[in-house]
Amino acid sequence: MTVLGHPGSWSCRWLPLLLLLLLGTGRDPGVEGVTHYKAGDPVILYVNKVGPYHNPQETYHYYQLPVCCPEKIRHKSLSLGEVLDGDRMAESLYEIRFRENVEKRILCHMQLSSAQVEQLRQAIEELYYFEFVVDDLPIRGFVGYMEESGFLPHSHKIGLWTHLDFHLEFHGDRIIFANVSVRDVKPHSLDGLRPDEFLGLTHTYSVRWSETSVERRSDRRRGDDGGFFPRTLEIHWLSIINSMVLVFLLVGFVAVILMRVLRNDLARYNLDEETTSGGSGDDFDQGDNGWKIIHTDVFRFPPYRGLLCAVLGVGAQFLALGTGIIVMALLGMFNVHRHGAINSAAILLYALTCCISGYVSSHFYRQIGGERWVWNIILTTSLFSVPFFLTWSVVNSVHWANGSTQALPATTILLLLTVWLLVGFPLTVIGGIFGKNNASPFDAPCRTKNIAREIPPQPWYKSTLVHMTVGGFLPFSAISVELYYIFATVWGREQYTLYGILFFVFAILLSVGACISIALTYFQLSGEDYHWWWRSVLSVGSTGLFIFFYSVFYYARRSNMSGVVQTVEFFGYSLLTGYVFFLMLGTISFFSSLKFIRYIYVNLKMD
């Protein structure tokens, strides 16, 4: 009652928290986090994380390795998105000053025990990389060097990079580019060490500054620094255009066929109605067949209507959430150099769009005669949050047990829980109240009889399984090309920047889902099967299953991921991704079928 009774105080109290989630470090999402320097000013280099190169989500703190470490570790204050991304930045011993070159300066001297050397050897054998951050610019490199050569005799050499060359480019008083190299460096061998022997190491580094004419970081492209997507842009566009042509042909084919068939059906049924107007309606029912004969049952409300409405509400919420993220990306609100900016925006939008799920679910629930609206609100707010919490609990526990930085700190967990309890859940309730109070009668075009009509036996190709296969495969085929790039980005290290293509693919996905749903619903009604409510949700919603099956294929055939930590994270969140697509596409499919059914029965002449 406090939340509803004092909306002004509620907004003033929690709006700064929402802004904090989005802005993270106090900067606007679209503004690059660039610091202005004077010559000789110190430039802080933060060490961040290390981990296997092929397991992007398996990361550990850099200082967990036996490396040069200050006596007192001071961590950088991070935004919510950075914490969710597994960042744990801490100050390093590297001394870098703006526009001052350094040649082979000593970082530290170390005496490593055999256990520490073995730890480094295992890290190098697993292709561990490190990530440093300079002025919000990530710098990545491998921890060491491994060489496998020959079969007989076989040689296995492992070396540690003890010298790093930092190359930084500046324009005026700003840093534009940063990189690290070991091109002209010889690795220090870690082979042949006795168990009781210590290994002495001296870590050094060099810093080279150069001026560039590039004024913005986003314009910086050199060699492979452009990333994965720019190198394959031409093939990417060609594949997307091919998918769009196929989709437009499919949509046009379905639309033309259905319009012609419907026109003939409506003309025939209306003509039959006029010729038999002198007879009774029962006589008409006994002499006809097809979708007209079930007009007294087609709007019979389905079982589990509360669950159906919850699915529609949460699906509408994720449709709004996905559209919002893509639109924000198209407007340039996500800087590729900002760590976890999309994560912060997604959490904020999810909390704010909870009102949509409550409104849609409660509104439709009241329309179809639901009375337990409180239970409906609880079911709606739990439909995604409970599976997400269970999945996250398992994944986070695995990360925590293995000491990974992907395990969220207790303070972050409390913050997210507070946001859901004080923002997400109340907005769901408020949306539900508005939806319930604004709900109008269902207003079906046809009266529903008290006794349900018996459904005749259906051929195998009109079964639910076949409809789910067809309805799921066609939308999946429309996004299969883009899906590879998305997986390569989410489960890789590149930044996704082709949001224009993503917008078109998202629109194509929704269009194909709607058209396929209408076609399958028409075929189902033509067989005198009026149980279309849940069938329409399952038919196109099954695209989520195909996406999960594709994730299994991607893990086995298109990636080199391995290990318990990465495997649990990948399949846990891939399962959630498929579930979200089921909710979104099931919602689009249902409302498309409902609109179509209302249209054909409104245009039908009946007594």
Image (cartoon, rainbow, N blue to C red):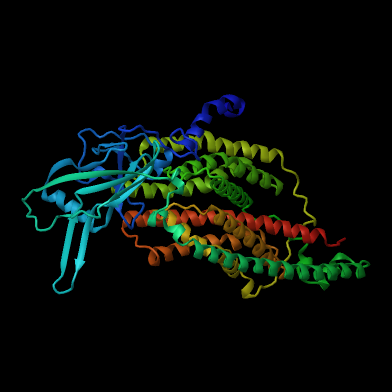
Question: Residue 281: where, in percent of width, then height?
Answer: 86, 65
In the image, what residue occupies the spot 84% across and 66% down?
282
Q: Can you say whether 151 is above or below 354 in the image?
A: below
Is 520 left or right of 18, judged from the image as shown? right
Quarter-of-image position of residue 93: top left
The answer to whether residue 430 is seen in the rendering is yes
Question: Residue 309: where, in percent of width, then height?
Answer: 63, 49
Residue in the foreground of this view, choosing between 495 and 123: 495
Q: Can you say whether 33 is above or below 158 in the image?
A: above
Is 198 left or right of 45, judged from the image as shown? left
Question: Residue 425: where, in percent of width, then height?
Answer: 54, 38
Figure label count: 0
Q: Which of the image's four quarters has the C terminus?
A: bottom right
Is 504 left or right of 565, judged from the image as shown? right
Question: Residue 83: where, in percent of width, then height?
Answer: 38, 41
In the image, what residue occupies the spot 78% across and 72% down?
289
Q: Can you say whether 337 is above or below 159 in the image?
A: above
Q: Can you say whether 10 is above or below 171 in the image?
A: above
Q: Which of the image's four quarters has the N terminus?
A: top right
The answer to whether residue 535 is seen in the rendering is no
Is 49 left or right of 435, judged from the image as shown? left
Residue in the foreground of this view, choosing between 323 and 443: 323
Residue in the foreground of this view, choosing between 317 and 290: 317
